[in-house]
Amino acid sequence: MPYSRELNFIHYAPTKVIYGVGISKDVAVELNALGCKRALLVTDRELSKNTDLPKKIREYLGNNCVGVFDEVIPDSGLHLVDKGAEFGRSLGADSIVSVGGGSAIDTAKGIAILLKEGGSISDYEGFQMLTRRQTPHIAIPTTCGTGSEVTYVAVIKDWDNHRKLLFGDYNIIPDVAILDPELIRTLPPRLVAATGMDALTHAIEAITSPQRQPISDALGLHAIRMIREYIAIATKDSDVTYRGMLLLASNIAGMAFSNAQVGLAHAIAHTIGAKYNIHHGLANSIVLPHVMQFNNEVVYEQQARIAEALGIKEDIPDKELGYKASEKVLEIAKSCDLPTRLRDVGIPKSELEECAEIALTDGAIVYNGRPISDPSEILEVLIKAY
Ligand SMILES: [Fe+2]
């Protein structure tokens, strides 16, 4: 993958990552190492109701936890971030420990901003708006896809306008990510598969992004190899070895895309996720093969390297190899028993045009491998994915 003479970039991945089966019991040690003693635990409502994971982390924190905010819902919401911050402030929290999927971790990033800066989260929409490090944050993912524990972005839904808003800033990257495969042992197979496909999308879109660079490429390609090897087996078998590898792959892909960005698949997933409440990973999984076919015209060299990482060994031109990569991605989604068409998840065909128009305004569009300027180009992808 040649890089131009003008290549220049910042690669920023400051999160301390710790991995191991059962390692989450060290959360208090990590919190104290950050100089904090009064953590607000931020977690998902369903996770809190249906599992003992948040309770366990609270026990591990002992006296270092001043309260639990467990109202996070899928895709979170601006109002929840404001509410969580108010709660944290009332308790005198000096730090945050988030436990859950992308929604819980992203909510915690938002709360981290408000505990430091005050105001309402809607005041901070956009990129690099902050001038100092935010409230210390330890992220403990319980899915294997978001990568949010190491990324600089929080995606929060504006429920009134059915839009997903992006908050991106180096100052909200979590300080510590605790990857404990034990916490994803009980994750339902469908969620393992869908979040794993989200991670695959992060890796592939990072590698095909115009902002790609050698470090993010290295991370993305290795994440792809790991996902290819472990996603199907980790979906069917809850053994911590397999699920741990997928959790790690998701983390590595997170570091790749936090630096190189994501593209069209994410622009569409944000759109249909907000409009029809379709799971983020599933939305990505459905559209990714079609986005890759659309992009192949421009980024076939990168997609040929992706094909190799996906295990395709054929002595054919890069353009054909790049196309084969898209077919392999579809095959992987099928091997995990995920639906593969937009019609399978209840999206009305008559609204595809509107979806294309909204997706064009999503922040991820500018980082798509093939430049997009007209909604008709996105519509073409949506119709194929339908
Ligand atoms: Fe994603």
Image (cartoon, rainbow, N blue to C red):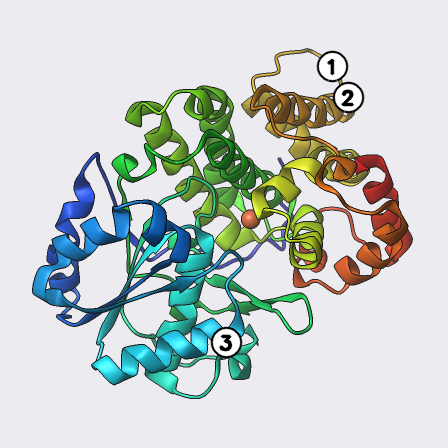
Q: In the image, is the residue at mark 1 within 8 Å of ligand 1 by its beta carbon?
A: no
Label number found at residue 79: 3
Whole-angstrom CA distance, mark 1 to mark 2, is: 6 Å
Q: Marks 2 and 1: in contact by CB < 8 Å?
A: yes
- Where is residue 345 drawn, in percent x and y? 71, 40
What residue type is disc 1 on?
Ile
Q: Secondary structure at mark 2?
A: helix
Q: Secondary structure at mark 3?
A: helix
Depicted 14 relative to depicted 184: above or below: below
Label number found at residue 31: none
**Residue identifier under label 2:** 320
Q: Nearer the viewer, residue 76 or 115?
A: 76
- Where is residue 58 drawn, in percent x and y? 18, 57
**Residue identifier under label 1:** 316
Mark 1 neighbour density, 10 Å: few (under 14) some (14–19) many (20 or more): few
What residue type is disc 2 on?
Glu
Whole-angstrom CA distance, mark 3 to mark 1, is: 52 Å
- Where is residue 223 drawn, in percent x and y? 47, 34
User: Image quadrant for the C terminus?
Assistant: top right
Mark 3 neighbour density, 10 Å: few (under 14) some (14–19) many (20 or more): some
Depicted 344 relative to depicted 8: above or below: above
Tell me where residue 63 sits by quadrant: bottom left
Depicted 149 relative to depicted 327: above or below: below
Query: Which residue is at 37% across, 36% downward?
Result: 248
Residue 277 visible, this orientation: yes
Query: Which residue is at 64% across, 27% downward?
Result: 329
What residue type is disc 3 on?
His
User: Image quadrant for the N terminus?
Assistant: top right
